[in-house]
Image: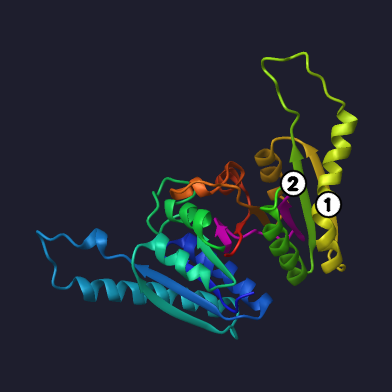
Amino acid sequence: MKDVIVVGVDGSPVSLAAVEWATDDAVRARVPLRIVFVLDRYPYEIAKFPNPDLDDQLARNAARILDKAEQTARARHQGIAVTTKVIEGRPAEALREQAAGAAELVVGTRGMGGFAGAVVGSVSMHVAGHAPGPVVVVRRLPEVSHGEVVVGLDDSPACQPALAYAFEQARLRGCAVRALHAWQVPVHAFAPEISYDMDEIRTAQYAVAAGQLDRWREEYPDVKVIEDIRCAHPVEALVEASSGADLLVVGSHGHGAIGSVLLGSVSRGVLRHAQCPVAVVRPRA
């Protein structure tokens, strides 16, 4: 694992919640925290109306935001090792580059270029769909500790990085992992006469879960594992479980080339509706 946690800030209240979450995680993992502000000049550079004071104004604003974020981190944990950094560029691209060299990247759900009315900002969604490793998207901090990390489970290799992250988070927190595998019976609209042996399907689904979890049970023998196998839509099941979780972890199955298309439909759904912070974990190169 890389030896620094990076959190992106933009001055919004939700980005300060992300700082608090990242601070707690850095202390648990005993790694430094790096707070970054991406200075995007593009929206302010109007060739027809140049502003000679633009550089100073943008620099002062960046310094003010980073100072507030650093104060928030130190108030959360006085002894934390924290640095701040201004990066010039487009927010999504700059944060994605930061994620490549970090243990994890933490962002808020809004701001940093997103639409104010969106549940998840466009930058947060883009970074979660592109950045390597864990990207934690924070809307707000849980009011109480539930003692569970929920991780989405399926039969694809994409869930293995998510499982690795979920078990490590559970170890650091001293809590349980709820491995949730939601499945649905195929619906054949043009062949309604097809029937299924439900007992056989359930047995197969339990076997899928057991096969994916065996390795992590061995590597983390002290972490309690709750196998939660449901016949339900994955997004609905994960969102429901998030109400009793400190963190929800999912992999990403997207294969597109543009924007959040790289996020699978389940990842997008839980980012929009989950009631706790969500970690989207993509494999590293």
- Total count of labels: 2
- Decide if residue 204 is on the left or right side of residue 52: right
Amino acid type assigned to the residue bearing label 2 in the image: Asp
Q: Residue 246 or 254: which is nearer the viewer?
A: 254
Q: Residue 223 or 254: which is nearer the viewer?
A: 254
Q: Mark 2, residues whose alpha carbon is within 10 Å: few (<14), some, or many (≥20)? A: some
What's the residue at 55%, 78% (across, down)? Answer: 33
Asked if the stretch drawn in magenta spans residue 137, the answer is: yes
- Quadrant into which the N terminus falls: bottom right
Give the farthest residue toward the left.
Answer: 48
Amino acid type assigned to the residue bearing label 1 in the image: Gly
Asked which secondary structure carries label 1, the reply is: helix
Asked if the stretch drawn in magenta spans residue 237, the answer is: no
The answer, for residue 149, to whether it is visible in the render is yes
Whole-percent x, y for residue 138 in the image: 56, 58
Please determine whether, in this image, residue 109 is positioned above or below residue 207.
below
Residues rendered magenta in the picture: 133-155
Whole-percent x, y for residue 177 in the image: 78, 58
In the picture of the structure, the residue carrying the numbered disc 1 is: 211
In the picture of the structure, the residue carrying the numbered disc 2 is: 155
